[in-house]
Image: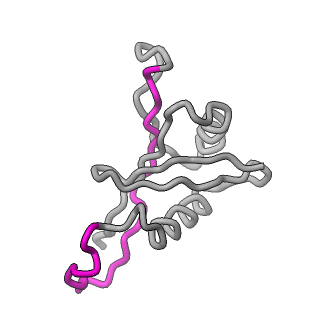
Amino acid sequence: MTFPLLFTLPPSSHHEIICLSTSSQTSLKSLNKQITSTIASSPNCAEFMAKHKKADESGAPETIQELRVHWDTKTRDGRIWPEYTVVTEENLAAVLAVLEKNTGRGDVLEVKVGKNSD
């Protein structure tokens, strides 16, 4: 079984929908890999005029720096339900279970992408 998951790349309106499998134990690493490959190939995630952008000289690839779920508080009591939750390895299974159970409710995975500055 799979369920759809909408993710966005704030602060832009770039987005995509992926299908997550419920039959296997999803790890944060596998979720990052699926999102990263989707971002690279999706026309919905493409930066406007990216083909005319000057090549980045640092050579450092963009990576996922943070995942957080922006919860739909219009259909939940916003006084007790949080606005967002940062996704970690420890809470990933629980977050995905809530997202799967409430598919279509308006919850969105926000993906913060950037370059590591080592």
Residue 2 falls left or right of residue 90: right
97 vs 38, nearest the viewer: 38
* Residue 11, horizontal then vertical, whole percent: 28, 50
Q: Is residue 10 left or right of residue 80?
A: left
Q: Nearer the viewer, residue 104 or 64?
A: 104
Image position of 93 (left or right of 12): right
The quadrant holding residue 101 is: top right
In magenta stretch: residue 61 = yes
Say which quarter of the image contains residue 50: bottom left
**Magenta part of the protein: which range?**
48-74
Residue for point 31% across, 69% down = 115
Depicted 65 relative to depicted 47: above or below: above
Q: Position of residue 15 (x, y in %)?
A: 42, 54
Specify the quadrant of the image occupied by residue 62.
Answer: bottom left
Q: Residue at x 46, y 31 (%)?
A: 71
Residue depicted at 22% across the width and 81% down the height: 52
